[in-house]
Image (cartoon, helix red, strand yellow):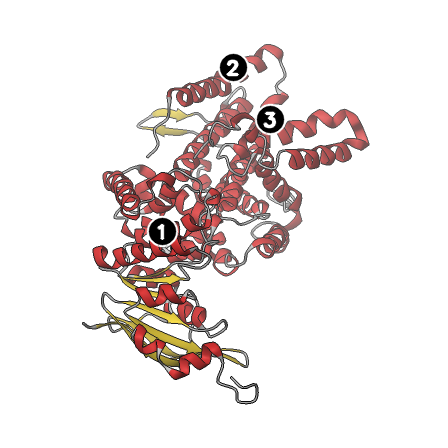
């Protein structure tokens, strides 16, 4: 196993508030790594810095030894590190299939002008986008909603759509932003299976931010815990479950005065 | 790549026959030659409006098309009167110059969204007007007058376009030219919207963050689209200058910029052909209300408000409701 992604001493300040303080960890190829922490721990900020949606205040993020922080999001996506969003961030008036076709932008071989004039390579692109979209729809098991408008989809399906859009870019690393939020137990388990399948069948390394503890424990190879912008623990799910600092962060420390 | 259906081909054919055969025949029969000027204006305004429509397509409200029309009109007029080059060459150059200016302006301002972008574009027309007043090359408030009519184009001694000055009816020639340009513009727009650039524009209109996360260089696409938009503004403006044979700083004003935007709204922001219909209806609507005298503006604006309230997706949404979306 090798370090695919490396977060090095990353700090982010918003005015006087330190959202992330000196965070360092690395992500191995083909693993599922979760970043957890109570609300306001700085998980989303960290995610935004890895995908260059936010610049770092100091520190850097490396992907295969190349810096990917403080660039433009599309540049990072081009390099193979792609993020997904929570469910409201979709192409509302496109169907599921249209969204997936558009998301294959990075795979295009023909130029924009080539598409306008309808050159041979543009026509081939369009055909291969269609085929790939259908493959992806089958892979994710969402053929029932293929031609639904995104704005008409229920929450559970929106997550699948978000995942599909991310996958359509053919990423090496996929950053999933709360993929299980607001899902019931069955939906969560289905999504867990799906994310595993993405890793196993497509060789995509997955980094995810999540609140749902049972899901995180069952899906992750390793877990990073943030609290008030600090990284307080790193380890396997079992290690994290027994880590005193983590228990304190989530449940509060034992307080003698009220006799807990 | 979308292929046109039988119905679409038929529609196109009917439209072309109406524009290039029936309308001139009607005008010749009825003697209403003033219609030539009206319809030529509609054709040219709809070209400029098509540009505005395209900026709407990436989610930007553009109230500055008058600026680029004015730039186009001046560039063509200066090239024809001072450099003595053919109008037909000055026409694309006017468009390209407008596009170039729009790139310089667009790079800093296109990152703004919503009302902020709209406000800055609203100022642009005034800025260009003031610049035209101040520069020596534009001849200040006196403007550029007595611009010669478009000359002849011949290929290997064969006349492709005759010298307009030698024609018995240059108004008809301008009508044909403007309609041909309009057809070309909207054909290109239809193609563009249905090609990948159009899809990327739609993705940006709906969610810029998500678009950039899938690798779309949104800043680049925004500039390209704004340049195409301004190119069309420049072309429309240059044609107007040539028809009027004069350009003044007041040839295009803020009101014109607002009208270009209204044309798009009225026709329908979701439909490629929206700006064409919108321009036609707005232009004729204004003329039809002429009888009302001083109440003209009041009734006109009242009707516009009512239309926008009841048809927020434009006039074309009436026809296509439930039949899928035209131009997609």
x, y (%) of residue B38?
61, 26
Residue under the point 38% across and 53% down: A186
Crowding at dot 3, Cα within 10 Å, few <14 / some 14-19 / many 20+, comes out as some
x, y (%) of residue B147?
55, 37
Question: Quick one: B191 or A79, which is closer to the camera?
Answer: A79
Specify the subunit that label 3 lies on.
B
Q: Report how far apart the C-alphas of labels 3 and 1 lie in the structure.
A: 50 Å
Task: Tell which residue pokes out farthest to the top in this image.
Answer: B29
Of badges 2 and 3, nearer the viewer stands 2
The residue that mark 3 highlights is B37
Crowding at dot 1, Cα within 10 Å, few <14 / some 14-19 / many 20+, comes out as many
The residue that mark 2 highlights is B22
Q: Report how far apart the C-alphas of labels 1 and 2 lie in the structure.
A: 49 Å
In this rendering, does residue B221 appear at all? yes
- What is the quadrant of residue B314 in the picture? top right
Q: Secondary structure at mark 2?
A: helix
In this rendering, does residue B97 appear at all? no
Q: Secondary structure at mark 3?
A: helix
The residue that mark 1 highlights is A165
- What is the quadrant of residue A220 in the picture? bottom left
Q: Secondary structure at mark 1?
A: helix
């Amino acid at each position: 196993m090798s370090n695919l992604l490396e977060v090095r001493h990353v700090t982010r300040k918003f005015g006087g508030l330190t959202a992330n303080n000196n965070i360092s960890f690395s992500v191995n190829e083909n693993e599922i790594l979760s970043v957890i922490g109570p609300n306001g721990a700085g998980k989303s900020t960290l995610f935004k810095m890895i995908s260059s949606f936010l610049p770092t205040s100091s520190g850097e993020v490396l992907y295969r030894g190349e810096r990917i922080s403080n660039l433009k999001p599309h540049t990072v996506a081009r390099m193979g590190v792609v993020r997904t969003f929570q469910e409201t961030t979709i192409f509302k008036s496109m169907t599921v299939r249209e969204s997936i076709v558009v998301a294959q932008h990075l795979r295009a071989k023909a130029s924009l002008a080539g598409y306008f004039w309808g050159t041979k390579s543009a026509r081939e692109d369009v055909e291969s986008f269609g085929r790939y979209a259908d493959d992806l729809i089958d892979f994710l098991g969402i053929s029932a909603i293929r031609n639904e408008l995104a704005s008409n989809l229920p929450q559970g399906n929106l997550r699948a759509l978000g995942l599909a859009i991310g996958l359509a870019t053919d990423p090496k690393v996929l950053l999933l932003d709360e993929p299980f939020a607001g899902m019931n137990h069955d939906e969560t388990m289905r999504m867990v299976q799906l994310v595993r399948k993405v890793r196993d069948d497509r060789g995509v390394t997955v980094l995810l931010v999540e609140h749902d503890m049972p899901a995180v424990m069952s899906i992750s190879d390793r877990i990073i815990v943030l609290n008030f912008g600090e990284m307080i623990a790193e380890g396997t799910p079992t290690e994290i479950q027994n880590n005193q600092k983590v228990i304190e962060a989530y449940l509060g420390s034992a307080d003698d005065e009220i006799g807990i | 790549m979308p292929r046109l259906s039988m119905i679409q081909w038929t529609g196109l054919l009917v439209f072309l026959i109406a524009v290039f055969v029936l309308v001139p025949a009607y005008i010749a029969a009825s003697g209403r030659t003033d219609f030539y000027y009206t319809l030529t204006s509609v054709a040219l305004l709809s070209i400029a409006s098509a540009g505005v429509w395209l900026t709407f397509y990436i989610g930007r409200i553009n109230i500055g098309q008058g600026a680029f029309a004015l730039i186009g009109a001046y560039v063509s007029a200066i090239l024809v009167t001072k450099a003595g080059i053919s109008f037909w060459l000055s026409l694309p150059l006017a468009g390209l110059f407008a596009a170039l200016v729009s790139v310089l302006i667009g790079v800093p301002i296109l990152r703004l969204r919503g009302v902020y972008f709209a406000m800055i574009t609203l100022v642009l027309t005034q800025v260009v007007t003031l610049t035209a007043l101040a520069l020596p090359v534009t001849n200040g408030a006196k403007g550029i007058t007595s611009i010669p009519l478009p000359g002849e184009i011949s290929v290997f001694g064969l006349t492709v376009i005759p010298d307009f000055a030698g024609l018995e009816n240059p108004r008809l020639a301008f009508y044909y030219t403007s309609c041909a340009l309009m057809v070309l513009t909207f054909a290109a727009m239809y193609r563009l919207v249905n090609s990948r650039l159009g899809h990327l524009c739609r993705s940006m209109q709906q969610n810029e963050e998500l678009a950039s996360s899938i690798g779309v260089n949104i800043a680049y696409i925004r500039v390209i689209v704004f340049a195409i938009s301004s190119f069309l503004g420049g072309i429309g403006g240059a044609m107007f200058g040539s028809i009027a044979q004069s350009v003044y700083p007041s040839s295009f004003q803020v009101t014109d910029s607002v009208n270009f935007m209204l044309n798009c709204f009225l026709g329908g922001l979701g439909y490629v052909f929206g700006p064409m219909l919108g321009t036609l209806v707005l232009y004729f609507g204004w003329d039809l209300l002429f009888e009302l005298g001083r109440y003209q503006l009041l009734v006109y604006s009242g009707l516009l408000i009512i239309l926008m309230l009841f048809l927020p997706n434009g006039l074309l949404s009436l026809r296509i409701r439930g039949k899928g979306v035209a131009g997609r």
